[in-house]
Image (spheres, rainbow, N blue to C red):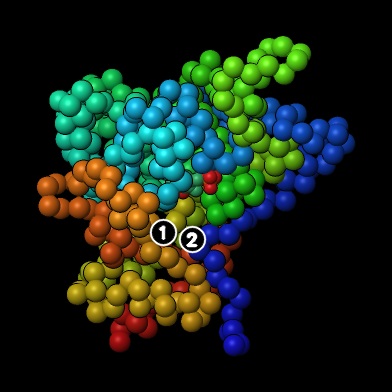
Amino acid sequence: MSQKNERIFLSSPHMSGKEQKYIQEAFDLNWIAPLGNNVDGLEQELANYNSIEDAAVVTSGTAAIHLALRLLDVGTEDTVFCSSLTFVASANPILYQGATPVLIDSEMETWNMSPVALERALQEAKENGNLPKAVIVVHLYGQSAKMDELVAICDAYGVPIVEDAAESLGSTYKGKMSGTFGKLGIFSFNGNKIITTSGGGALVSDDVEILKKARFLATQARDPAVHYQHSEIGYNYRMSNIVAGVGRGQLEVLDMRVEQRRAVFNRYYEAFAKVPGIIFQPELEDTMSNRWLTALAIDPKATGVSRDEIIERLAEDNIEARPVWKPMHLQPLFDGVAYYPHEEGKSVSDELFAYGICLPSGSNITVEQQELVIAVINELLNK
Ligand SMILES: *Cc1c(COP(=O)(O)O)cnc(C)c1O
């Protein structure tokens, strides 16, 4: 099969050219282990960037969420609430701990956790004497959830928040960095995220002691003794010094990447915002989304074309587009798990999954490539 154009990815790594310097330094110092100058440097720089006390870098965002649940003492008798509309990595660590997930729907103003559904779920849990150990709040595609409301509700019930900010590094809510509202926040540096270390993640918190414990658990929970003594379960989750070097070179250009992704979003927005039946993921007032992925919902009754037809047609031109995440409450893995829709009988995340699409959004996509994506979609819309 001949392809007219080079593949246009949903979101591909975009190097800054500043990474090699840090990697070379690690080689020069022979600090190739999961400790060293780049690990320390990246932790410091990440904490500074987010105006938070401390950061601990680890092997993945998933590992960071797992550590967060361990640090909050989540065990087999516990429940943990989690946004349903997300990538499976948000919820898998609940199962790693043998705990019971409870899934919470989205609302339409941010596509993130519905405060109304959360309140209902917490009220019921309280009545049953079964409040969750934590609430995992996801910031989908870079857009922050309604943190004022969610924090107020969780505070009222005394339940800590873990912010899954894997997709929202660089985003803000009322001027404060996404990921810094909860007891713990996590970021991901996976290959498809706004900046990447090829694979990696971080935990952030204002509680320096809890991150000390995180580093301890992430290095096999070794007791202070020369003879390798262990009193609790640990993990091999620390980031390598080479990988951290890539992260330092990437963090230098994060603000530029946010601008670039937002410019990509704006081009799509100009092209399709006025089409009846198309709505873009909103940017809540007083928030700034890094627009990691441009996400929109397409109502086929109004546009005459379905989300799936668009994805298939784009694929013919070697363009990668994806449906919005399939909600966790619809996943076979979470069969039978409790789910709280936004309103009784109205599940917002089901609708977003049915109609939602993510378009190629990488900071390295060219204007010509984006024009091709827009032209292919326009052709379908005008049929
Ligand atoms: C990417 C992602 C993660 C997991 O990060 P990894 O670094 O790939 O383990 C978790 N949650 C969400 C919402 C993500 O998009």
In front: 322, or 176? 322
What's the residue at 53%, 50% (across, down)? 193
Residue 347, horizontal then vertical, whole percent: 20, 53
Vertically, is 366 above or below 91? below
Task: Specify the quadrant of the image occupied by residue 218.
Answer: top right
Residue 14, horizontal then vertical, whole percent: 63, 55
Label annotation for residue 383:
none
Name the amino acid, label 1: Thr
Q: Which residue is mark 1?
A: 294
SS category of the residue bearing label 2: loop
Looking at the image, is mark 2 or mark 1 earlier in the sequence?
A: 1
SS category of the residue bearing label 1: strand
The answer to whether one can see residue 347 in this image is yes
In front: 300, or 337? 337
Residue located farthest toward the top when viewing the structure as drawn:
225
Question: How far apart are the alpha carbons under marks 2 and 1?
Answer: 6 Å
CB atoms of marks 2 and 1 within 8 Å: yes
165 relative to 133 in the view: left or right: right
Label annotation for residue 361:
2
Vertically, is 371 above or below 18? below
Vertically, is 156 above or below 8? above
